[in-house]
Amino acid sequence: MRIVLAAAVVAGVLAAPAAAAQPAPAAPPAVHMPAARPAAHPPTVHMPADKPPFPYADCIKATKKRGESSRYGKWHCDQLVKKGWVRPPKR
């Protein structure tokens, strides 16, 4: 009886790796959804000054209040223009 039981255990152990080697079932196909269109940005001319982008002149005034030199203040505001926090100056 022990031999039959041992043979069954060996057969089970040998069959387990074969079952594990089978490929996993394929994932369900993805549902194609059209890409959302980006919302159009409203013109920046009518945006209030209390939300970004802020006017360039206000940036210059704020840098003077903080005690920055005019050269450093211009550089600082130009960096904020690049980030989108300040509107470019009208030149």
Image (cartoon, helix red, strand yellow):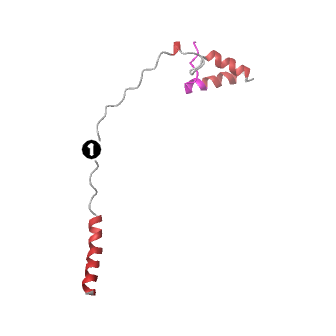
Residue visible at 26% across and 68% down?
18
Q: Is residue 32 above or below residue 52?
A: below
- Pick out the residue farthest to the right: 67
Quadrant of the image containing the N terminus: bottom left
Residue visible at 27% across and 44% down?
29
- Please count the marks in the image: 1
Local SS, label 1: loop
Dominant SS type (magenta): loop
Q: Is residue 83 magenta?
A: yes
Please tell me in which quadrant of the rendered image residue 76 appears: top right
Left or right: residue 21 versus residue 72 is: left
The magenta segment: 79-91
Mark 1: which amino acid?
Pro
Residue behind mark 1: 29
Q: Position of residue 40 (x, y in %)?
A: 42, 20
Q: Is residue 21 magenta?
A: no
**Closer-to-camera residue (47/68):** 47
Please tell me in which quadrant of the rendered image residue 14 appears: bottom left
Please tell me in which quadrant of the rendered image residue 48 appears: top right
Q: Is residue 76 above or below residue 55?
A: below
Q: Position of residue 9 (x, y in %)?
A: 29, 78
